[in-house]
Amino acid sequence: MEHVNAYEQLAKFREQRGHAHALPSVYRAALPYAILVPLPALAIATGLVGWPFAVAVCVSIAIAGLARVCIVASQLAAARAKVDTWIRLHPASAPRSAAIAQRMEELVSPRKRKMLASSLRRAVKCAAKPPAISASVLNYPAVRAQSSLVLALADRLGDLERGAHPHGVLLALDLLTQGGSPFYNPTRAHELAATLQRALDSLEVAH
């Protein structure tokens, strides 16, 4: 029941707290620099500066903007990792911050679920007929042996008519994106079935 309540309280938390402490936006960080870019062109048109100086200013603005975007992207990745850790450790708890609520909503979004389902199906397809030469580190034998469970997880994620708990979606994401997961690490191949089943079970949301 607590597992279900955490899911149901997600929407309530968003309404009560709003987005005041949501994760930072990379695009928002770049906006001030994007606004400045037309100014050198305007200065040239009015005869205030020559084009070499204007080009230098534009390049400086672009470099500063890129640096800012990189800094914010790094901060975002660190914040997301911290939030994901909290979700893993508190699967039955309601979100305690807007950042956690936002991340939970992102995890259960149709876009994220369809993307994960597609990646899982693609992994099964690749494992069935591994290419002779591939840069992939996918553990083909393990994925092939557990293909039915992998496809079951893909189908469950892709069934958008059924609710999905953020914790389960995160476990599926971890499986696909963490290099040390049983999906890739041969020494953990024996854990793949249990990991897939845990993700499947964690997706369930009672109605």
Image (cartoon, grey):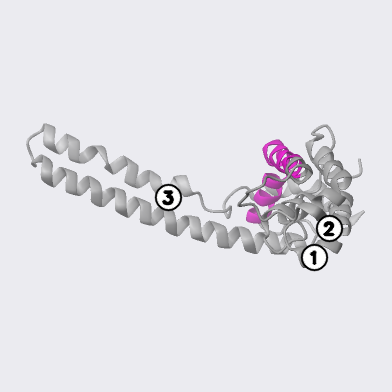
Q: Secondary structure at mark 1?
A: helix
Residue of label 2 = 192
Dot 1, how many residues are within 10 Å of its Cα: few (below 14), some (14-19), or many (20+)? Answer: some
Which quadrant would residue 106 be assigned to in this image? top right
Q: Is residue 48 above or below residue 26?
A: above
- Which of the two marks, 3 or 2, is nearer to us in this view? 2
Element type at marker 3?
helix
Residue 33 position, x and y percent, is: 33, 46
Of the pair 19 and 57, the residue shown nearer to us: 57
Residue 137 visible in rendering: yes
Q: CA distance from mark 1 to mark 3?
A: 40 Å
Q: Amino acid at mark 1?
A: Arg
Circle on res. 200 = none
Q: Which residues are magenta?
A: 98-123
- Magenta stretch holds residue 59: no
Give the side of residue 35 with respect to residue 94, left or right. Answer: left
**In the rendered image of this protein, does residue 70 appear above or below residue 105?**
below
Q: Quadrant of the C terminus?
A: top right
Element type where label 2 sits in the image: helix
**Does label 3 or label 2 sit earlier along the sequence?**
3
The residue identified by callout 3 is: 29
